[in-house]
């Protein structure tokens, strides 16, 4: 579950190249140049690699004052085996990015041939211009895993709350050094059998997206992390 939360969070941060006028409208803390490629590695609490996420900016389609952005995601395990691959889109409008968690998460969740995943939820919103002390809207979703017969195997409810812009920091990774906005939030996932709470920190760079994330359990101990390791544009 913790691994899924990280993948879900990261998967909304990248979008495609726009025309000059439109790029000014959609130029926030996300990659937006066509052909941009990013690779991020997810680590467990002992800093052992557990997954590799690769993104490529594909295209955009504009209509009126909004732009629909398409990109490709590929998720691999620590041995380099492909877990999931898919295209998904997000919306750029009114100086903000609206990420539909239903599109994002279904593109990165591996499923068995006889299973299907049904996801409902809010749009995760990121304004292009962020300031220290700013609060951001919460987000919630429900994920149901079921057999083709319709029998529900599991229902997971997830909530992202208390999102705040803490400030700005310089972050250095194998991909380079970046000036980032620092955002914190609380995460909750629960089923009928368990409930998991976490506090999270994410660092986003202008024109790139997620550079680094860290997740901590309810005791304040590091549970997982994610880091940008390659960048091509």
Image (cartoon, helix red, strand yellow):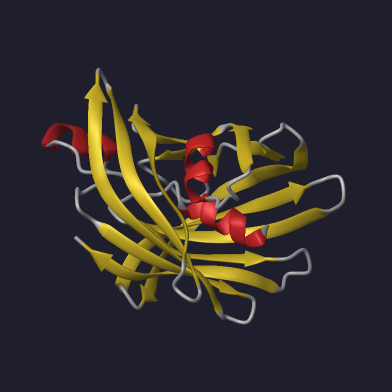
Could you say where residue 227 lies in the image, as x and y percent from the top left?
44, 69
Residue occupying the point 63% across, 82% down: 46
Quadrant in which the N terminus appears: bottom right
Q: Quarter of the image holding residue 200?
A: bottom right
Q: Quarter of the image holding residue 222?
A: bottom right
Q: So how many labels did they put on this image?
A: 0
Look at the picture and state if 229 lies above or below 199. Answer: below
For residue 188, say whether it is visible. Answer: yes
Using the image as rendered, state which of residue 113 and residue 77 is in the foreground. Answer: 113
Could you say where residue 202 lies in the image, as x and y percent from the top left?
50, 59
Quadrant in which the C terminus appears: bottom left
Residue occupying the point 48% across, 37% down: 103
For residue 29, say whether it is visible. Answer: no
Residue ranking furthest to the left: 20
Could you say where residue 197 lies in the image, as x and y percent from the top left?
75, 56
Residue occupying the point 72% across, 31% down: 150
Residue occupying the point 34% across, 27% down: 94
Look at the picture and state if 106 lies above or below 217. Answer: above
Could you say where residue 42 lies in the image, as x and y percent from the top left?
51, 69
């Amino acid at each position: 579950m913790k691994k899924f939360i990280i993948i879900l969070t990261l998967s909304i941060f990248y979008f495609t190249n726009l025309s000059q006028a439109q790029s000014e409208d959609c130029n926030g803390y996300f990659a937006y140049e066509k052909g941009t490629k990013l690779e991020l590695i997810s680590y467990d609490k002992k800093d052992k690699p557990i997954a590799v996420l690769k993104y490529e900016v594909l295209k955009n389609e504009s209509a009126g004052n909004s732009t629909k952005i398409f990109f490709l995601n590929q998720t691999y395990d620590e041995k380099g085996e492909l877990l999931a691959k898919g295209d998904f889109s997000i919306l750029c409008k009114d100086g903000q990015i609206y990420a539909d968690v239903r599109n994002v998460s279904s593109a990165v969740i591996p499923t068995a041939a006889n299973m299907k995943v049904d996801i409902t939820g809010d749009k995760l919103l990121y304004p292009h211009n962020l300031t220290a002390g700013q609060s951001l809207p919460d987000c919630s979703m429900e994920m149901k895993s079921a057999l083709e017969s319709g029998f529900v195997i599991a229902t997971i409810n997830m909530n992202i709350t208390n999102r705040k812009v803490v400030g700005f920091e310089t972050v250095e990774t194998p991909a380079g050094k970046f000036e980032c906005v620092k955002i914190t939030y609380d995460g909750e996932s629960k089923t009928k059998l368990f409930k998991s709470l976490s506090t999270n920190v994410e660092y986003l760079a202008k024109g790139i997206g997620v550079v680094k994330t860290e997740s901590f359990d309810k005791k304040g101990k590091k549970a997982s992390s994610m880091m940008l390791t390659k960048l091509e544009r």
